[in-house]
Amino acid sequence: MAIRGIRKKQIDVEQVPPAVTPPTRDGAINSFPSRPKLTSKAKKRDIPEGLWIKCPSCSGLIYDKELDDNLKVCPNCSHHFKLGARERIHSMVETCSFEELDPMMESVDILKFTGSSSYESKLVSYRKKMPMLKDAVVTGVGLIGTHRVALGVMDFSFLGGSMGSVVGEKLTRLIETATDRGLPLVIVSSSGGARMYEGMFSLMQMAKTCGALSYHARRNLPYISVLTDPTTAGVMASFASVGDLILAEPCAMIGFAGRRVVEATTQSELPPDFQTAEFLKQRGLIDVIVPRLEMKQRLITYLHYLMANQVAS
Ligand SMILES: [Zn+2]
């Protein structure tokens, strides 16, 4: 059968008129809209906030992404900005090798603490602000180079990295895991000290973590403590200062009580570099100062030596 004779009308298809530009109300032909005038407001380039960061040390402006790519180290003067726990873990362990321990453990307001704001409301606001963190420490087991390591990293941005029951418990469980599995331990500290909202419960964490460390040491397993800016008070007075090897980032503020308290107590003038990593290295508290960009490689070297001794023993 020939089909060329079939027309639209024959198969009941409605004839559609060709599309035309609708005439304007006054019948004039449509023309292109006139070019919009640029106002002084529109001429200004909108720069989103937080794109550029001013370095507190050299006052230079650093592009946010460049700073992130450089592990939050100023490319001009090597000033070390604070680094979050997740970013630091990512920079230290091999890709996809980190198994987190106790990721859902959360603090509770056991004392019903109230001050200018309640502890409960502080916890809620911080968890909302930082959904990737449940508290001020992230712990787990991962590979650094070829070494399987128990790794704990504190995060100063969560309530000043303060050590409450959860921080103490997570670190203790990490140390116990390292002891049970025969693993070396690395803890990166960044803390303002014990968490006042938890009173005596926070102070008890000092003894608990050090107790667990002594069992770890009895198995001749190495513990490397890495101190970052700032590491102070209850954390410095407990697990952070008892490493077999104590590393610190350059210019990190490290100490127990604040400068003014020490000055008032000792009634003496303190040197300008008091409580810095460099000052403490000169006096033997810190073994070595390691820039952040070299940290992973240096840890691999130290673990190689320390674990070689472990295997030999
Ligand atoms: Zn700088």
Image (cartoon, helix red, strand yellow):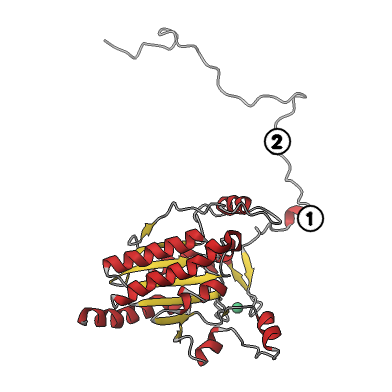
- In percent of the image, x 56 and y 63: which residue is there? 200
Nearer the observer, 40 or 158: 158
Q: How crowded is mark 1: few (under 14 residues within 10 Å), some or many (20 or more)?
A: few
* Residue with the most extreme left position: 312
Q: Residue at x 28, y 72 (%)?
A: 146
Q: Assign the N terminus to one quadrant of the image.
A: top left
- The answer to whether 157 is drawn above or below residue 54 in the figure is above
- The 10 Å Cα crowd at callout 2, few under 14, some 14 to 19, many 20 or more, is few
Q: Quadrant of ligand 1?
A: bottom right
Q: Residue 31 carries which label?
A: 2
Amino acid at pointer 2:
Ser
In the picture, measured across the screen, residue 217 lies left or right of residue 258, that is left
Residue 171 location in percent, x, y?
Answer: 42, 65
Residue denoted by label 1: 40
Residue 2: which quarter of the image? top left
**Which residue is found at the position 44% from the left and 51% from the top?**
104
* Residues at discs 2 and 1 in contact (Cβ within 8 Å): no
Q: Where does residue 20 sit, x and y in percent of width and height?
A: 61, 24
Amino acid of disc 1:
Ser
Let me know if residue 138 appears in the view. Answer: no
Residue plotted at (22% across, 81% down): 313
| Mark found first going from the N terminus, 2 or 1 | 2
Q: Which mark is residue 150?
A: none
Q: What is the quadrant of residue 126 in the picture?
A: bottom right
**Could you tell me how far apart the alpha carbons at marks 2 and 1 are, in whole angstroms?**
27 Å
